Each structure stands twice: as structure tokens, then as C-alpha cells.
Amino acid sequence: MPELPEVQTVVNHIRPMIIGKRLTTIRPIWEKTLHNFNVEDIDRIKPNNQIIDVYRRAKFIIIKLMDHIIAIHLRMTGKLYVSEKKIDPKYATAVLEFEDKGSLIFEDVRKFGRIYLYDDMKIIDSRHGPEPLDKNFTVELFKNMIKRRNRNIKALLLDQSFLSGLGNIYVDESLWKSGIHPNSNSSSIPQKKVSMLHRNIQSILNDAIVKKGTTIIDFSVNGRSGEYANDLNVYGRNERSCFKCDLKVIKLKVAGRGTYVCTKCQKRYK
Ligand SMILES: [Zn+2]
């Protein structure tokens, strides 16, 4: 599933191509894709249909119009890319059409991806924690957030209402780099380790954005993506030697997710 770096990669790619364009309609191919609106609602906002910004919030791609926002969640297999072709691709579930030529194709093999229409960001903001790369996400804030919770650290980091944007891959990488076992209790982790975790979450996400994510997001013919896969330290490395020690990385189930851990380098704080 795309996480913060993958979603940011999509935003960085489509932003210059669609900003300033006028959205004429959102045509559903798989009806459920339009989650809380229909085509008539788009007709109604047409006088103010110019795209004035495109950005990421949590794992959502936000397309900002003058008086509304369109939020797109890729879920498992969603892909979003600009196309000038007239024929809908095989797995397209919705097409965002522009006044001039071209459209934004939402392609989704497993059809879990959704598009939302809201007046503003209130609903999304109310359901999501801080952005880990925001300057307001300070180490002091993170220490307070962790201290107030008494919960499995991996489950907590995956919880979008606690912190936005992280998923299975980047949580495992951040915990390994910080020497924290994913089954640790959040409130028992020493302050020093929490600071380290804060720093590592930010550096790993920033590095992954530069490498255009870990998973291949095949959104354009020329766009290379997924190069962070070569930089993974623990995720997907079960039965292979840890990069810090010689012990083999094992795979556990934590918070219902396949989790990679080195039991020698990652201490469990109970
Ligand atoms: Zn190790």
C-alpha cells in the first residue's frame, strides 16, 4: 500500500501537469469509487472548477479547487496519472476530465481506492494526526504524544489518527534504525530512544521521497519510482543477516501486520 513517500511522489509528478486546469467532470467507471458525491455535485461546482493547488495530506492526494477539495486515497493498488488518450484503460475506475485536452486517470486493479469531495480539509484534519515532516512536528511534541499513550509502538505508529502517513514498511525501518522492538510498549520507551525514533522517521521518509518511494508506482512511462527498495534495512529481509549484527532478521505478526525485526538490535521495552 502506498505510504507517505509514494503518495508524495505521485503529487510531485502530477502537480505541475494539472495545476491551473479546469475540472469539467469526474466520470465514475466503478461507481463506488466516488465515495460521498456524484457527477451532479461536480456539475454544481463548475463555475469554480479551477485547480489552484495539489498537495498531500496523510495518505491523501488533495486537489484543491476554489471552493472545494477533492481527496483521493489510493488504498492498495490505486494509480493516478495524466493521460491524453481517448480510450479508458482496462483497470480505470474513474476519470477526472479537464476543460482542455487530457484527463487524470484513476486506475485501480483491486478497486479499494476512493475519491471524496469536501468543502474544506476539516473532516480529514480531524481524523489525522500531525504530519511527520511538518516543522511543527517537533521532538518535544512527539515525546509528549508517545508518553501519553500506553500502547504497542507499532500499532501506534500505524494509527493515522496518531501520526499521519506511515505504513508497514516505514514503521519497520524506523524502529529497526532506532533499536526499538515493534512489540515495545510506547510509554516504556526511554526519552533518548524516542528522540532517535523522531529523527529516524524524518530522515527515512525524506530519503524515500528522494528515491521516489519503495513500491513501484507505475504512473508514467518515463517516471522511475520505487528506488528506495534498494535501501531497505530490515523490511522484507527475513532469514537474511541483519545489517548491524550477524543475527538473522525474523518475521513476526505485530498489530496484525507482517513485521520484520532483529531481536538482537531491537530492544523490547515492556
Ligand atoms: Zn541486528
Image (tube, rainbow, N blue to C red):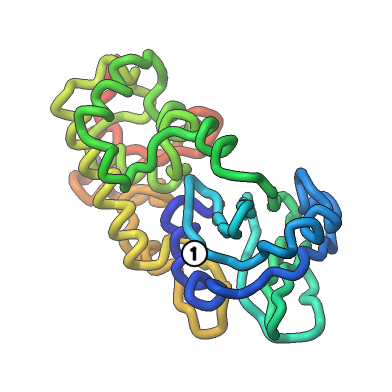
The image shows residue 207, relative to residue 98, as above or below, that is above
CA neighbours of label 1 inside 10 A, class few (<14), some (14 to 19), many (20+):
many
- Does residue 32 appear to the left or right of 214 in the view shown? right
Q: Secondary structure at mark 1?
A: helix
Relative side of 196 to 23, left or right = left
Residue visible at 37% across and 16% down in the picture: 149
| Residue 226 shows up from this direction | yes
The number of callouts visible is 1
Q: Position of residue 42 (x, y in %)?
A: 77, 58
- In the image, 42 versus 193, the foreground residue is 42
For the point 39% across and 51% down, the residue is 237
Q: Is residue 231 above or below residue 133?
A: below
Quadrant in which the C terminus is drawn: top left
Residue type highlighted by circle 1: Val
Residue in the picture at 58% in, 66% down: 51
Q: Position of residue 32 (x, y in %)?
A: 82, 49
Q: Is residue 55 above or below residue 199?
A: below
Quadrant of ligand 1 in image: top left
Q: Quadrant of residue 24?
A: bottom right
Question: Pointer 1: what residue?
Answer: 11
Q: Give the left or right position of residue 102, taking residue 139 as reference.
A: right
Residue sitting at x 45%, y 44%: 165
Q: Locate residue 133, reporting x and y percent.
A: 31, 47
Q: Determine the residue located farthest toward the front in the rendered image.
A: 47
